Structures are given as structure tokens and as C-alpha cells.
Amino acid sequence: MYPYMEKSSNWLTFRRQPFLRWPIPGRPFLTIAPFGETMHTAKCGDMAVEPTPSAEPDPTATIYCAGCNERFRVLFVPAACPRCGAEVASDGNMMLAETLLYKVAEGTDAFPTLETPTTNDVGDDLVGRDLHVYRCVSQIGRGGMGRVYLAEHTVLERKCALKILSPRAAARDVDYTSRFMYEAKAAAALVHPNIVTTHAIGEADGFHFLEMEFVAGRSLQQLIQDEGRLTPVRATALSARIAEGLAAAHRARIVHRDLKPDNVLMTHHGIPKIADFGLAKRIHADDDDDGQYLVGTPNFMAPELFRGEQATPASDVYALGVTYFLLLTGQFPYAGGTLQTLMKAVSENPAPNARDLCPDISLEMAECLSLLMAKTPENRPQDAIEAAQLLHAVAGQVRDIESLLSEAFDGTTGVEWTRSEKRYRLRMTLPDGRSQSLFIEPSDHAAVERLILIYSKCCPAQPEYYEEALRLNSEVSHGALALRKIDGEECFVMIDTFPRSTVDPEEIRRSVLEIAFRADAVEKLLTGLDQN
């Protein structure tokens, strides 16, 4: 979960300014310091691992993953990181800043709530209070730099996400204020459909604040956790739009430096928006002020960054490539239980072949992925502008089914859908109270001949229904009544097809509505039931 988003899980974890220092040849230290307030959902049941014969359940056990730079709660240790799969042990007495777990929604308590307060826990809560022209409605996120509130702009009468720097954090470290204001200015300079919009920055009553667009949805990380790997077309389409937002930052000579699924928000319409420019930096011709430091998340860092080189647009492109790999395959290209192991793997080992992991990935997608993740920055697209062009060339003009559905049924009630592999299952409530399930999936033809199939089950194909089904088929003006196996059962279905390359949301919408009504009518005539 990202700070600017609504709660959708029982648990949140977050970190408070963890630092890792690592020696670099010829330089004093490599410092990995993720300053942003990235938060992530941690459903404890999803992170349980099979116990070893000697392992005993420990409800307070935590593990730390150097690659993800996150702590996770687990039932047994040692355990594997629930995100990247790296084998990691209990964090023990590692000298890292505190990571807390707070209960944020109703539900069964898998673990007790930790109640250790942080120094910015007391006196900073603004829920129910007014600040400047904002009324803080609820807290939707928190991190080492402060809190994020769902707020109402009392003058413009709109919802917004209000990010407020903790006064105590600012008092402890003067860099907090300058870093916070830098994030505000970097984000405010960028206006793009695929970037979270910053509306205002300011100070009131001793609080520094940043007003941002409120994105009611979930993060890309949550999408991966909920759905697993995406279909290749959808993964490519999403990566292309993320690249477009990143390209806007690169045009403004801003490097993000911490691009990852946690920092990409997904609207309810499936539009990705890049957030958290807390680590961003402007590029100057003589900019070498941070050559000996490294910021970001290790799993997404380019090989040259581990050598102490400066962050560049090409290193952002590498992070985009890792994100694309994760969307296509559902796993990270590299994993290591320690930072040293991960650095060695990223720097020396070739990336796994995505087609070996998932054969449905096209050759063009695999080649694009290898360019984005090239070891040498000169072999990658030099910025996200080139990366976006490459991804769009791979995707062509074909839209993914998810975005077609989102646009087709925007604002429509009574339509829900889920995905299983390439097939989408829609559930539609009809005006008379009956309901009908439909399926949408691509055909198995060659790419240039591929179709979108829209069909709905009428009833099992029993012999006594054949004659009446043939008569009804002659009267159907939209779609056709056909035989098709669904979950191993031969069924009568109402089906319609469209060319995959040209279908648009309005065609999807009209066809789904027509097919649903006709399939339900056939089911009612043949069986008198409402089972599908």
C-alpha cells in the first residue's frame, strides 16, 4: 500500500529511514538510504512458510530482506522473503531503523499489534483538524518523514492527499525539511497523466505540507500480490505507460532513482501513475555531488550503481526493466539473502530468459526486456523517452483486455470481473434480478489473425435441448449459439467475436450486454433456471 491510497488490507508495515553502508573501492562508503515513505501491504497469512522440523512458531518473528530493503513478519524463521524469494534469516539485532506493524482495518488478528511508538507518534495526528485550507479526514499512510491524510480542500471542495512532514522529524534532522521540499518541487514540476499530480506546497501552523492528487486504487505492487503475473499484453501496455510518465521526468532532467511497483499507483481505471519523488535529483552538467552515495531499493538498482556511479536516466530505465520483468513473470530476475550476494548476481550473472519462465512471452517482448536490463548502461535505451518508444513498438496498437473493460464499464454498476490466466470472467446483474456470467479471452490464432471471444454459458448441452437450441439460433441477430467446453463440461454458449487488433471499448460494452441478455433468455427458455 502506498501512502496516497485507501486502506485495503488488515496490516501495514513501514520503515523509518534505514541506512546500509557498504565499502566501494576508491570511495569511503556506499550508502543505501531509502528516504521515501514507501509502504507495503503485508497480509500475514500470505507470508507463512513451511516450518523446518526444529522450527517453532514465533508470533513476533521478523525477517529483513536486503534486496527489497523491507522487513516482513513471518510465522517461522528462517524463511524466504515473501516478495523476491531470497532466503533470509531473522533480522536479529541488525542496526536498522525500526519497522513497525499497525492494525489499520477490521479483521482477524493473525498477530498482535505492535505498540512501540515512534517519536513522531505523539501530538502530530491531525485527523478531524483543519490545517490551512484543508480538513484532515483520515490518515491513509505514514512513514519516517511524516504522515499522509485524506483531506478535503475546503475552498475548492475536492478530495486530496495531504502529505505532512513530521515537526519532530524535522527537528531531529534538518535534511528532512530540505529533502521534503525538494520532493515537492521536483514533483510539482511534472504534469503528466502517468504521474501523481502535485497541486500545492506550503507551510502552516509549523507544518510543512504537500497537497497531491488523491488516487483511490491500489499500488502496482498490490496488483502483483493480488493477481500474480500479468498477461504479456497487459504487462507491456502498463510498462509503456509507466515509461511515458518517467519520460516526462527525464525531459525535465529529473531522475527518479527509486522506480518500483510500490511507487506506481493504479487508478480504478487501470491507469498507472508514478509517485514518490522523494529521492529524485536534477541532472546538472557538473553534477557529481552524490557520486559516492547510492539511494534506492537494491532489487531495482542497475549494476553501475553498485559500483558507486551516479544515477542517470539509463539507471531509471534499468529499474523499469526489472518492473517489466516482474509484471511478465511474477518474479524478480535476481534474489540474494544478503546485499553482497545480490550485488554480485546483478553485476555478474545474466538475467534469466523470460521465455524460459513463461513461454507465452513473445520474442519481441523478451528482446525488449533484455535491452532495458542490459548490464552496460550504454546498451540500454538512454532514457525513458527511448524506452517508451521501444515498448510501444512491441505493444503495437493492441490494447490489453483489462483497460478495455475498465473503459467499457466506467461508471456502470452491476458488472464485476476477475482474471484467471488469459481469461476474464464477468458477473452481470440483470434488471429483472437474474444474473449471468460471461467470459472474455483472446483466441489462439496467430497474432495478426487473433480474435477476442466474448461468450456466456446458457446451460449444459443435453440432447433434449438440441432441437430447441437450433431453432433459437436461427432467430439470433447478434452473436450465435454454439457448443463449447467450459471447465470440462460441454455447454451451449452464446458467443461473439471481434478482431483483437481493432476492437474498441464500445464494441466490448455492447456485445457483453447483448450476449448476457440473450444467454440468460436461452437459459430461461431451455431450463427455466437461473444458474449461470
Image (cartoon, rainbow, N blue to C red):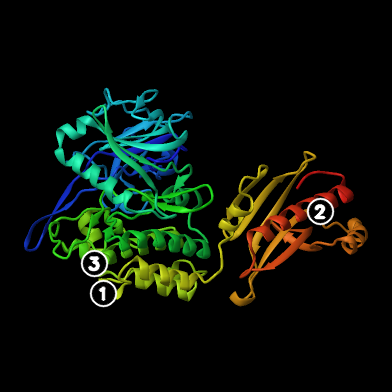
On the image, numbered disc 3 is attached to which residue? 347
Residue positioned 62% across, 58% down in the render = 423
Q: Nearer the viewer, mark 2 or mark 3?
A: 2
Identify residue type, mark 1: Glu
Q: Foreground mark, 3 or 1?
A: 1
Q: Secondary structure at mark 2?
A: helix
- Which one is nearer the viewer's eye here, 344 or 268? 268
* Residue 53 shows in this picture: no
Q: Nearer the viewer, residue 487 or 308?
A: 308
Q: In front: 164, or 29?
A: 164
**Percent coordinates x, y for residue 400 in the rendering:** 56, 62
Q: Which quadrant would residue 407 be assigned to in this image?
A: bottom right
Residue 96 x %, y %:
20, 41
Is residue 502 among the parts visible in the rendering?
yes
Residue picked out by circle 1: 378
Q: Secondary structure at mark 1?
A: helix
The N terminus lies in quadrant? top left
| Left or right: 202, with 23 as reference point | right
- Distance (Cα) linking label 3 and label 1: 15 Å
Q: Amino acid at mark 3?
A: Ser
Identify the image quadrant of residue 312.
Answer: bottom left
Against 100, residue 317 (above or below) is: below
Question: Which amino acid type corresponds to the residue marked 2 in the rendered image?
Answer: Arg
> Label 2 vs label 3: CA separation?
58 Å
Residue found at x 36% / y 25%: 130
